[in-house]
Image: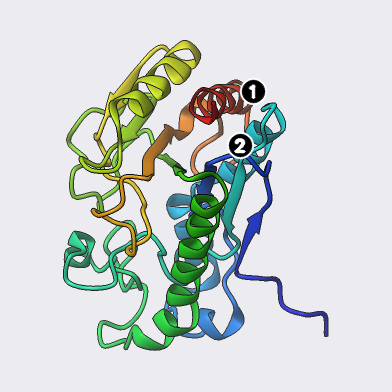
Amino acid sequence: MPPAAPPFEFLPGAADSPVILHVPHSAREIPAEVRAGIVLDDGALERELDHITDSHTARLAEEAARLTAVRPWRFVNRLSRLVVDPERFPDEREEMRAVGMGAVYTRTTHRSVLRPAETDPEPLVARYFRPYAQAMTDAVAERLSAVGRAVVVDVHSYPREPLPYELHGAGARPPVCLGTDAFHTPPELLAAAREAFGSAVGETGLDSPFSGTYVPLEYYGNDPRVSALMVEIRRDTYMTEPGGPPGPGLTRLASALASLVTAVTG
């Protein structure tokens, strides 16, 4: 048998780039032993993957990296977020636990059963969540050591219409939503993103329908050398929903992401 594909990859960029494009939710792959714990039949699981996956965001980040003079680093999850969601808090701080979507999901986007409620999350957290978190921590540490700062740009997408699992789905749903953190998102990073994506899509929003951004817990709230921003792209701007192919908008948005990377690299 061929060796199993790695659950994540840290893809090298330029030695002097502080930027890490983080792509946590683009994959659909679920290992067989994890699939066995999911109660959905194959058809229902494929439909759930259509809704929950940030389709084509890994390609978008790859194309953006190619367009930059100083290539950013990329940290890409190669497994579905239905295995574990590496962006959740692993404890009671995570508000999505209220709808069965903590680090290990027990409910679907439509609030039906994904795993039995009594599922023990610890085996999946130990096998997948903690190694991912450590690798991302190491990636940031490596950039800090090399260039003295790290800029994590979290690349996501979201549907045009809210899904039942969304806790804040009643708010604005602009073509690009920029998620911020009071400590880790400096004004100049936000301004650069507004300029880069505003020219591409004409409208950017702030922290609606999704807010916050990913920072490894070791640095979260205590190290200003680590800055971060979440870029949430509305899916109808670049693909056919749900789970369909990309369209010409992907190239335009990759160019905008490349412009953001260039702006914050210098």
The image's colour scheme reads rainbow
Q: Residues within 10 Å of mark 2 (few under 14, many from 20)?
A: many
**Residue 137: x and y, percent?**
45, 63
Question: Which picture quadrant has residue 115?
Answer: bottom left
Q: Is residue 174 above or below residue 148?
A: above
Evaluate whether residue 232 shows in this view.
yes
- What amino acid is at disc 2? Leu
Question: Which picture quadrant has residue 266?
Answer: top right
| Structural distance between the alpha carbons of marks 1 and 2 | 11 Å
Residue at (52% x, 67% y) in the render: 135
Numbered badge on residue 113: none
Location of the N terminus (image quadrant): bottom right
Evaluate whether residue 243 shows in this view.
no
The mark that comes first in sequence, 1 or 2, is 2
Residue at (22% x, 73% y) in the render: 91
Residue at (37% x, 38% y) in the render: 229
Provide the residue designation for mark 1: 248
- What amino acid is at disc 1? Pro
| Foreground pick, 263 / 117 | 263
Q: Residues within 10 Å of mark 1 (few under 14, many from 20)?
A: few
In the drawing, does residue 52 fall left or right of residue 146?
left
In the picture as drawn, the residue positioned furthest to the right comes out as 1
Question: Which picture quadrant has residue 29?
Answer: bottom right
Mark 2 lies on a secondary structure that is helix
- Image marks 1 and 2: residues in contact by CB distance under 8 Å: no
Of badges 1 and 2, nearer the viewer stands 2
Provide the residue designation for mark 2: 60
**Residue 204: x and y, percent?**
34, 21
